Amino acid sequence: QKEVEQDPGPLSVPEGAIVSLNCTYSNSAFQYFMWYRQYSRKGPELLMYTYSSGNKEDGRFTAQVDKSSKYISLFIRDSQPSDSATYLCAMTSNTGNQFYFGTGTSLTVIP
Amino acid sequence: NAGVTQTPKFQVLKTGQSMTLQCAQDMNHNSMYWYRQDPGMGLRLIYYSASEGTTDKGEVPNGYNVSRLNKREFSLRLESAAPSQTSVYFCASSQGGLGQGRTEAFFGQGTRLTVV
């Protein structure tokens, strides 16, 4: 079983839709959770970063962490064509030396 | 502030040739990483360096070597390139040292390597 599971999609939504992206994980030691956005032929860029459980909001983006269920989510409100990208979740522990990534979900927002 | 810089951006090698991918960060981070990204496989860790002077194998280290030259620079070497090493390579860095945990990672723009 992989440490982090992420549905690869692809996901296609109309402009203005609410998008929900999700990851599950197996290691209860994970405390730091990240979402990255990767445009085609570019490097991953950090989108959201949260520590432990709870919600974090940044503009149209909301990250949620449910440690009891080992489940994290990224919500995108009022999605735009410029949100079309691959979204990767990542996580790590307080003492770990590595990050653990999901395989990424490909999102297309149709104008 | 450049962040993480990788060179070269593109490279074509013949089977058996060697090359070194260079990575430098200007964020004073302790940890640096090399990943490869293949379609459907996500990011796979090749090697990492949790602090200056240390390196450790990741998930897919075979066929690669690394050098943590100083705190800023971490290079990846392919001694005898094989077609299976055709991939996009990303360098990343993060704060946090050996056994200290880390927060977020910052990535370079990648090196597209083709081995023919």
Image (cartoon, coloured by chain):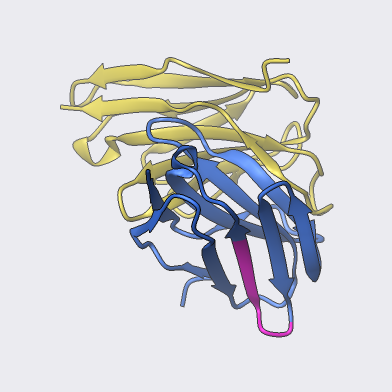
Chain colours: A blue, B yellow
| Residue A86 visible at all | yes
**In-image side of B50 versus B91 (left or right):** right
Specify whether residue A69 is painted magenta.
Answer: yes
Which of B106 and A110 lies nearest the eye of the viewer? Answer: A110
Residue A50 percent location from the top left of the image: 77, 57
| Residue A98 visible at all | no
Quadrant of the rendering where the C terminus of chain A is positioned: top left
* Outermost residue, left side: B116
**Residue found 74% across the figure and 72% down from its top:** A29
Q: Is residue B96 above or below residue A32?
A: above
**Residue found 78% across the figure and 65% down from its top:** A55
Residue B23 percent location from the top left of the image: 57, 22
Q: Quadrant of residue A62?
A: bottom right
Which of A25 and A23 lies nearest the eye of the viewer? Answer: A23
Specify whether residue A22 is painted magenta.
Answer: no
**Residue found 80% across the figure and 71% down from its top:** A53
Question: How many labels were placed on the picture?
Answer: 0
Q: Is residue A58 above or below residue B9?
A: below
Region rendered in magenta: A68-74
Residue B2 percent location from the top left of the image: 67, 16
Which of A17 and A19 lies nearest the eye of the viewer? Answer: A17
**In-image side of B53 versus B58 (left or right):** right
Residue A88 percent location from the top left of the image: 52, 53
**Residue found 45% across the figure and 55% down from its top:** A104
